[in-house]
Image (cartoon, helix red, strand yellow):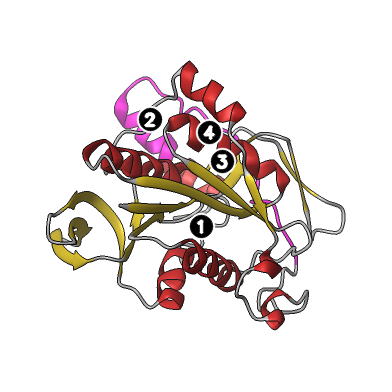
Amino acid sequence: MNILVFIKQVADTEARIIISSDNKTLEIENKYVINFFDEFAIEEAIRIKEKIKDSRITICTYGPARSIEGLRTAIAMGADRAFLIDSTNYESDDPLIVAEILAAFAKKEGFDCILCGRQAIDDENANIGAMAAEFLNIPHVNCITRLDVLENGKVRVESEIEGGKKVLDITLPVLLTTQKGLNEPRVPFITGVMKAMKTEIITIDPASLDVPKETLDKNASKTIIFSYEAPPQRLPVKIVEGVTSGEKAKALIKALRDDVKVI
């Protein structure tokens, strides 16, 4: 089984992020990790390979050179190959463009199943998986919580819906997006880390893929950033004074009415 996993390297949640003076770019501390939801995709691919021995796991990301670190982490976990589609000369983060580039890579490499996280925690877009599936003209299911490979060239997936769960049998090829609850991603062993350091990460220029030239044009993006704005400062914590619960309740009501003005 040929399994392809799309991942993204994102800023660590503890990284310091500063809005630049022009309010149009961000200065991000050099702390990056694999996107939280993509870890479940990598782990699920490895579990499939453990059950189906002739499977091969290919990891792919569209991003700058630093994204190689994330690819090596995926190799350390148990993936077989890794490709970096270098975005250095193509600065667009437009999700439609990214999805088209990833789909072009998938067509070139071939696949039976594509896995990726349901969304990236930096932009919270949650559209790239579905859009890539549309470019590939294959079925897709979002936010799966269970995946079983059947013997008849199908997979059975389970996803949460309002008030219950939905179970589907889908004929391969298929694209599935993963979320928390599907599995528990493993921590790489030292042997995996050593293997990852020796593994060649192949770098690809997006222009070498079957992508229309106009898609890669610097003005192709339909997304325009007007400005970044920091969230409003939180009000300081105020301790409600009082001896009895009744006194504390009166003081709380007074603070909500006079200080916060919400009642």
* Badge 4 amino acid: Thr
Tag 3: amino acid: Leu
- Secondary structure under badge 3? helix
| Residue 144, x across and y down, in percent | 27, 54
* Mark in the foreground, 1 or 3: 3
Regarding mark 2 in the picture, which secondary structure is present there?
Answer: helix
The image shows residue 198, relative to residue 70, as above or below, that is: above
Mark positioned earlier in the residue sequence (4 or 2): 4
Q: Which residue is mark 1?
A: 124
Left or right: where does residue 170 sit relative to residue 195?
A: left
Task: Report how far apart the C-alphas of labels 3 and 2 lie in the structure.
Answer: 55 Å
* Nearer to us in this view, 177 or 27: 177
Residue for badge 4: 73
Q: Which residues are magenta?
A: 227-252
At 72% from the left and 35% from the top, the residue drawn is 30
The reply to whether callout 4 and callout 3 are in contact (CB within 8 Å) is yes
Q: Which badge, 4 or 1, comes first in the chain's sequence?
A: 4
Callout 1: helix, strand or loop?
A: loop
Of badges 4 and 2, the one in the foreground is 4
Tell me which numbered mark, 3 or 2, is placed earlier along the sequence.
3
Badge nearest the viewer, 4 or 1: 4
Q: Quadrant of residue 183?
A: top left
In space, the residues marked 4 and 1 are separated at their CA atoms by: 22 Å
Which residue in the protein does label 2 denote?
248
At 31% across and 31% down in the image, what residue appears?
246
At numbered mark 4, what does the secondary structure look like: helix, strand or loop? helix
Labelled disc at residue 171: none
The overriding secondary structure of the stretch rendered in magenta is loop
Seen at 31% across and 43% down, the residue is 44
